[in-house]
Structures are given as C-alpha cells and as structure tokens.
Image: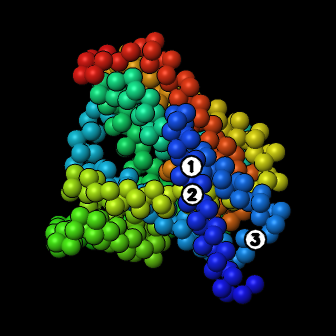
Amino acid sequence: MGGEHVSALQVLLIGLAVTLAVVVKGVAQRFSLPALVGHLLLGVLLRAADAQWGFMGPEIRTAFDLLASLGIVALLFEVGLTSHPRALAEKLPTASVLWVGNMLVAFAAGFGTVYWILGGDLLAALFTGTALTATSVGVSVAIWQESDALDSPSGRLTLDVAELDDIGGVALMALLFAVAPVLDRGGSVWGALGSTFGVFVAQFLGFALFCYCFSRTLEWRITRGASRLGSSERMIVVAGVGFVIASIAGWLGFSLAIGALFAGLVFSHDREAVRTETSFRDLHAFFTPFFFINIGFHVDPSALGGALTVGAVLLLAAVVGKLVGVGLPALWTTGTGGAVLVGVSMIPRAEIALVVMHQGRRLGEDVVSSELYSAMVVVSALTCLLTPLVLRPLLRRWPQESGAND
C-alpha cells in the first residue's frame, strides 16, 4: 500500500474514532454511564474488525499508539491540574487514616489475589496491586451531585481520599517502574529496592525540584506571555509545555504518565484561570478516548475466556479492598451509612488503574499477560458500570445533607 493511501487510511480511521467517541460519550451521558466503557468497547470492536479485514498495518498502529500516549499525558495532566500540593497537604490530617488504610488494603487485596490465589508471579501481582489502589471517583461524583450530596461531609471525604488515591497510585507506579527491571531479571524485592531505591529517590527528587523551580520562576512568565495572544492560545501553550515536561520524565525513565502529573501540578496553583479555559477541555476530549480505545484494542480475544474467570476473582478483590480499606476506618468518622457510601464510591477503577496495567503490559507478556491485562479491563468496565447502580439506592437510603454532619 502506497504512503498516500496509508495516510488517507490513517486520517479516515482517526476521524471515525473521534466521531464515534463523541457519539459514545453522548449516549453514555444519557444513561448516566461512564464514557470510558464505550471507548474500551470501541477498541475491542476495532481489533475484531482488524482481525477480519487486516487494515491496521504497522504505520496505522504507530499513529494510534502515539495518540494513546498523548491521551495518557492529557489524562494525567488534568489530574495534576485539578490538584494542588498545598490543598493535598491540608487534606492529610482528616483523610490520611482512610487514605493509608485504603491504599494498604486495596494493594494487599490485588497482590494477594494474583500471587496466592491465581498463582501469578511477583511482578504481575505488584502491578495488579498498584492498579487497584487507584480510584476513579468521577464515576461516583455524578451520582452524589444528582442527589445534592456532594458537599456533605461524606461527599467531601470521598473526593479527598480519591484525590489522594490517584497521587498515591502514581507514586507507587513510579517506584514499581524503578524496581521492575531488576525483578524481571530474577532479583528479590529487597534486593531490587536496595539497588534502585537510592537512584530512584535521587532522580525523583531532582525531577520534583526541577518542576518546583519551574513553577516558581518560569510558569507565571509563560502563562502571562501567552495570555497576550488570547485565552485559547494561553491554554495551548500551557498544554504544550506540559507535554515537554512529560517527555523529560519519560527520558528519565519515570514514564510519560508521571511526567504529565507533575506538569499539571506545576500549573495547578493557577488552576482557576487554567480550568476556565475551554481549550484544554477540547484537547482532553480529543486525545483521552484514544487511550481507552487503545486499551480495548490490545485486549486479546483468545484470552477473553480465561480473562472473564480471572476478572470475576479480581472484581471481588477490587470491591472488598475498597469496602474494607475505606469503609472500616470511615465508621469512626461518618457512621455506618456514611462509611458504606464512601466505600462503595471508591470501588470504580478506570484511568489510573488502566495506565498502570498498560505500562506493565508494555514490559512484556512475562510481566503482565494478555489474560491478566484483559481481566483488568473487565474489572474496570464492571466497577464503573455497577457502582452507580448500587450507589443511587444507597444514597436514597442514607440521604446526605450538604454541609451537615452525618
């Protein structure tokens, strides 16, 4: 196939993917469902179509991989952009007990299920445990909002713990990427930590210091200068600089996802100005579906049979990990009703969980197998679909008043 025909096919497929992603999002919103489930399904269908007609050649797959990488950057950039280090520090006194318990129990549930129950190897268990620490609270937020309960103590606590979850999950992912090569060569966990931890901490602190200095000395000059060009241009420049920072993290071995999170944090102190711009929302809406479409595309149909069984076991671990890890500590601060609501709201796993598994999958079949990868996609889809169905009646049973104590 000639280069011109390949380019035409690339543009055609990307155009169709963008259009279908918007349609899927509109349909999902009508039924109060997360759009990412539809985007995952689009990827699965794209792979099935390619298996039938064979149109996804190497050049086209490279184009989709690039768009998926940009989707990861846009996704994590937004997470950092909507966070703020000072605000996160202020949340620690009230949310830290729930957050630490949540991270430990959720990780242990995922790790133990893969390592001891499913008989997986150490790296697969570590990636699964790390993936299950994260929370996609956006799935639950809409339900809390429609119940006018998001500003209640339990609603605010849910948001605080979930935000800390995302940051903690990304931090664990960074550490895991540092030790994974040593473990993949057959080294022990403690040996891997001993040989890589010092270098990891030095690089991590160096990159964090670079981001901090950039934020204090250059960020405001860039945004102020770009503002003279217009509001849309300012956000495009901010996003472009964010992509550059993410690429630096990628070169250092931290992955684009971690760099994108830090890039968002760099600009987060000016978040009210940044978040009011429509430009980044447009970039986010364009790129992030490609990440989930790419995830779905890499689901191996031949592994789906076993993946459903493994996914059912991991789904139980995903549910128990959050209900126990968050729900039990929350009993002392929110009461029974609030504890159940917070625990259920933390069950969805989507963006960060899939980023972790996607990065693990890139390390090879011996790290994250096709079956485990597909199983975690099943877990992500089911937790996002089932949680709203459970949370709505629970909020009717235990209504939460905004600004009131439970």
Secondary structure, mark 3, is loop
Q: Taking 136 as reference, is 367 above or below it?
A: below
Residue 260 x %, y %: 40, 63
Between 235 and 219, the residue placed more toward the observer is 235
User: Label 2, on which residue?
Assistant: 19
User: Label 1, on which residue?
Assistant: 23
Secondary structure, mark 1, is helix
**Disc 1 from disc 2: Cα separation:** 6 Å
**Disc 3 from disc 2: Cα separation:** 19 Å
Query: Residue at left 55%, top 60%?
Result: 18
Nearer-N-terminus badge (1/3): 1
**Disc 1 from disc 3: Cα separation:** 23 Å
Q: What amino acid type should be assigned to the residue bearing mark 2? A: Thr
User: Label 3, on which residue?
Assistant: 55
| Among the 4 quarters of the image, the one containing residue 240 | bottom left
Query: Residue at left 26%, top 35%?
Result: 93
**Circles 1 and 2 in contact, beta carbons < 8 Å:** yes
